[in-house]
């Protein structure tokens, strides 16, 4: 019954179904990845570094390796292998969390490396069900919402469970939360499994998405390398700041508000950020023209980057509250981060009719991004150890703002020149540069 109703890929039922399926699956993935970083692991040290930092670096290293592997695996993934792969990835992650609880400190950090190793590929599997459609930007919002909201909600959930069951140690909490979410994960994966493939209209408008081979990848990099490099470096910095803000949220709030603050603040800031980002990103799907959609996406990214720098300056001047800063900073980060993930590459593939899929681009960016995340953690531990967590966040926010704005501007100029912007102003009667801009869509 559900399969038949989902055949209409422009219907409200189809859109709502895909939003729920992608949101739920990715939200549950975070239940296997994020809860451990709510623990403080007080007075535990390894290699002269705080044990929490060691744990975060171990997991991020696994996650980063997963992203590098995903450049090949996700870009070449056949549709028939999606469901077995995503289930296998999550089960491997949960077994790793079991090892994290069973093996005593200080030897259990390795299990967080194993935990991160499969999880980095989950996003690509989910997005492969959604990309290449008329409404991909809207459908991808399920992933975006879960990415923003899950971290805050799971931190609050962690603290509530810890209060109810104080006998569960910080090392067993991640496995416990993962086990609670496993049935939900299976339900949402079933929802994904019956989503139909893109129809002919989707393929005309957004270009058909196919598994890539090595020659396809080389061709893309040769033609569009400089512009893609600018996007990659910007995404790297955004990922680094996003991860730092998320992983050390408890410590940052202790810095800026003292030790007495409401634990629900995580959910409040992230859910408000989610609402703002959804309202800003979802309308991108209404722009049929790929070149104008690309401009709108690039503009939104620039606004998000500016918001991170301006909000940090306002907080430093004590013109906004700690809550206002964390809300604005998170909103700005995701206003830049999310459009790159779900909209920018979609528009580039459709505009230039690339033989490519979004997984190839996003996983290249993600792999580099998590490398930057590890770098910032190590730099803070060895060269900024005396600085408070909030100071590190502020300094990197300024660096990100100036650097990423420059990189985005260069990428805008590159892709506009590549497209041939002057063709948009041809005389009446001249053939438009891209036939898809003038087609009438029919079901």
Image (cartoon, rainbow, N blue to C red):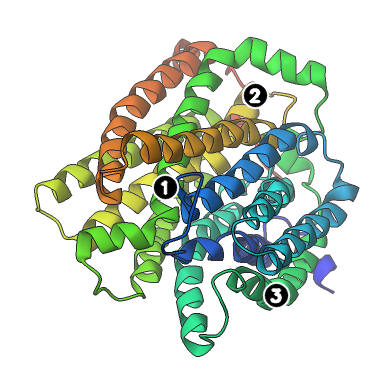
Residue positioned 78% across, 58% down in the render: 92
Quick one: label 2, few (<14), some, or many (20+) residues within 10 Å? few
Q: From the viewer's perspective, is 45 left or right of 23?
A: left
Which mark identifies residue 284? none
Mark-to-mark CA distance, 1 and 3:
26 Å
Q: Where residue 34 sits in the image (x, y, percent)?
A: 55, 60
Residue positioned 69% across, 55% down in the render: 111
Image marks 2 and 3: residues in contact by CB distance under 8 Å? no
Which residue is labeled 3 in the image?
179
List the single residue furthest toward the right. 80
Quick check: 232 above or below 67? above
Mark-to-mark CA distance, 2 and 3:
51 Å
Mark-to-mark CA distance, 1 and 2:
44 Å
Q: Nearer the viewer, mark 2 or mark 3?
A: 3
- In this view of the protein, which residue sits in the foreground, 37 or 349? 37
Which mark identifies residue 435? 2
Quick check: 183 above or below 197? below
Quick one: label 3, few (<14), some, or many (20+) residues within 10 Å? some
Question: Sequence order check: which comes first, mark 1 or mark 2?
Answer: 1
Q: Where residue 124 sits in the image (x, y, percent)?
A: 70, 45
Quick one: label 1, few (<14), some, or many (20+) residues within 10 Å? many
Q: Where residue 434 sits in the image (x, y, percent)?
A: 61, 21
Q: Say if residue 289 shows up in the picture.
A: no
Residue positioned 69% across, 64% down in the render: 103
Question: Sequence order check: which comes first, mark 2 or mark 3?
Answer: 3
Question: Sequence order check: which comes first, mark 1 or mark 3?
Answer: 3
Q: Which quarter of the figure has residue 309? A: top left
- Determine the secondary structure under disc 2: helix
Which residue is labeled 1 in the image?
244
- Determine the secondary structure under disc 3: helix
- Determine the secondary structure under disc 1: helix
């Amino acid at each position: 019954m559900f399969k038949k109703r989902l055949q209409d890929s422009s219907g409200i039922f189809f859109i709502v179904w895909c939003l729920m399926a992608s949101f739920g699956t990715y939200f549950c993935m975070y239940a296997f990845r994020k809860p451990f970083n709510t623990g403080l692991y007080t007075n535990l040290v390894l290699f002269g570094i705080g044990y929490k930092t060691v744990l975060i670096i171990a997991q991020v290293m696994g996650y980063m390796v997963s992203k590098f592997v995903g450049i090949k695996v996700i870009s070449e993934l056949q549709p028939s292998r999606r469901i077995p792969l995503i289930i296998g990835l999550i089960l491997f992650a949960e077994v790793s969390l079991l090892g994290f609880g069973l093996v005593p400190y200080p030897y259990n950090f390795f299990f967080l490396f194993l935990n991160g190793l499969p999880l980095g590929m989950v996003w690509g599997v989910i997005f492969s069900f959604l990309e290449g459609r008329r409404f991909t930007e809207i459908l991808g919002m399920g992933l975006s919402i879960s990415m923003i909201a899950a971290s805050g909600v799971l931190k609050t959930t962690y603290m509530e469970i810890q209060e109810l069951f104080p006998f569960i140690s910080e090392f067993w909490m991640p496995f416990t939360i993962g086990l609670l979410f496993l049935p939900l994960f299976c339900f949402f994966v079933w929802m994904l499994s019956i989503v139909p493939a893109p129809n002919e209209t989707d393929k005309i408008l957004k270009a058909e998405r196919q598994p890539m081979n090595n020659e396809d990848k080389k061709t893309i990099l040769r033609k569009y390398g400089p512009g893609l490099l600018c996007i990659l470096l910007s995404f790297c910095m955004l990922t680094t700041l996003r991860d730092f803000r998320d992983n050390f949220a408890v410590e940052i709030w202790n810095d800026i508000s003292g030790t007495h603050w409401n634990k629900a603040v995580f959910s409040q800031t992230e859910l408000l950020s989610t609402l703002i980002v959804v309202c800003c990103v979802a309308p991108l799907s209404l722009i049929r023209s790929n070149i104008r959609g690309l401009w709108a996406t690039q503009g939104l990214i620039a606004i998000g980057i500016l918001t991170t720098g301006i909000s940090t300056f306002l907080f430093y001047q004590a013109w906004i509250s700690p809550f206002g800063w964390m809300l604005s900073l998170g909103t700005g980060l995701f206003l830049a981060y999310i459009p790159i993930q779900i909209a920018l590459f979609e528009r580039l593939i459709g505009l230039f009719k690339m033989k490519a899929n979004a997984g190839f681009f996003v996983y290249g960016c993600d792999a580099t991004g998590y490398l930057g995340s590890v770098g910032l953690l190590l730099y803070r531990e060895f060269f900024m150890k005396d600085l408070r967590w909030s100071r590190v966040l502020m300094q990197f926010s300024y660096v990100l703002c100036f650097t990423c704005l420059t990189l985005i501007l260069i990428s805008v100029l590159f892709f506009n020149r590549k497209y041939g912007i002057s063709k948009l102003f041809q005389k009446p009667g001249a053939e438009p540069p891209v036939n898809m801009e003038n087609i009438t869509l029919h079901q």
